[in-house]
Image (cartoon, rainbow, N blue to C red):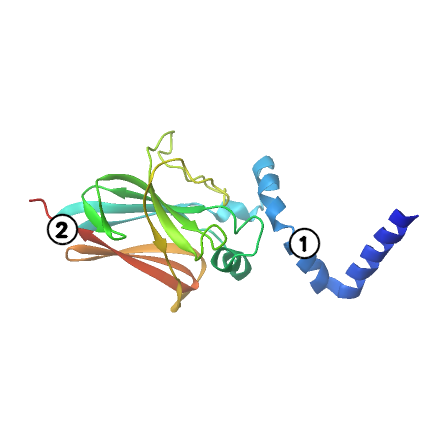
Amino acid sequence: MIIVRTKALALATLLSLGSAGIASTVASELPDAPMAQDQMAMGEDDPRKATTIQTTSAKLGNVADAVTVRYLNLPWGPQTFGYIENGGNQFYSTRTWPIAHLTLKTRVKFFGREFEPGDYVLAIVPKGLAHRMGMQVRSFQPSGERGTFLVPGNVFTETPDGPIVASRPIEFTPGAPQSDAMRISLVSKKNTVEMTINYGDRSFTEKLEMVKTK
């Protein structure tokens, strides 16, 4: 009898909240979505099909395509990114988010240290795992047919294993052109490349500087 009354009370509460309340309740269960996504095949109209690997490259000094970035055009909404930025969610605030595969053909200074040519993971560290939202750079060895850890349609890609070679807090600032999905651009400026990560109307920019060979 107690069980019946409890279920009836829960149903009455949901009905009293209306559609907004039900939507809020469903949203609170988002941490369960990754398991369902991994287990289900994508149908014809599945919006995940629009999440594909994007590639951008830039020249640095005399080296063509010295910096190459591959990334997924992640359709993160304000609420989801808010969990990463501000913490408070049992899934989105408790794991790292590998957003880009960085390939270097030449030595650069980036994130306050020098990087050798090779492959690196750029991963966002949410507030919750750290005192403030940040970014870590990991060195890794690509494998498989695609040669990258990124998987089209998989917005919950796991961060590859590899040593963390740099890490620091980051902040996205308002004022960028509006974008419905994450976008990364590279702009060559003499001996530097500016990398800008754009989410919504906010962006984060970091420079990669050429290291001159002695």
Mark 2 lies on a secondary structure that is loop
Residue at position x 64%, y 54% from top?
28
Q: Nearer the viewer, residue 24 or 150?
A: 24
Q: Position of residue 18 (x, y in %)?
A: 75, 64
Identify the amino acid type marked 2. Answer: Gly
* Vertical side of 162 occupied by 94: above or below: below
Mark 1 lies on a secondary structure that is helix
Is residue 1 visible in this depiction of the protein?
yes
Residue to which mark 1 is pinned: 26
Identify the amino acid type marked 1. Answer: Val
Disc assigned to residue 123: none
Residue at position x 28%, y 42% from top?
103
Give me the C-alpha separation between circle 2 and circle 1: 51 Å
Q: Quadrant of residue 171?
A: bottom left
Is the residue marked by circle 1 packed among few (<14), some (14-19), or many (20+) residues within 10 Å? few
Side of 80 where 182 appears, left or right: left
Side of 183 where 41 appears, left or right: right
Is residue 43 visible in this depiction of the protein?
no
Q: Hey, which residue is sitting farthest top in the picture? A: 144
* Vertical side of 18 occupied by 102: above or below: above
Q: Position of residue 31 (x, y in %)?
A: 60, 47
Residue at position x 45%, y 39% from top?
151
Side of 120 where 107 appears, left or right: left
Q: Hey, which residue is sitting farthest bottom in the picture? A: 175
| Mark earlier in primary sequence (2, 1) | 1
Asked if the residues shown at circle 2 and circle 1 are in contact, with their CB atoms under 8 angstroms apart, the answer is no
Residue to which mark 2 is pinned: 61
Q: Quadrant of residue 197?
A: bottom left
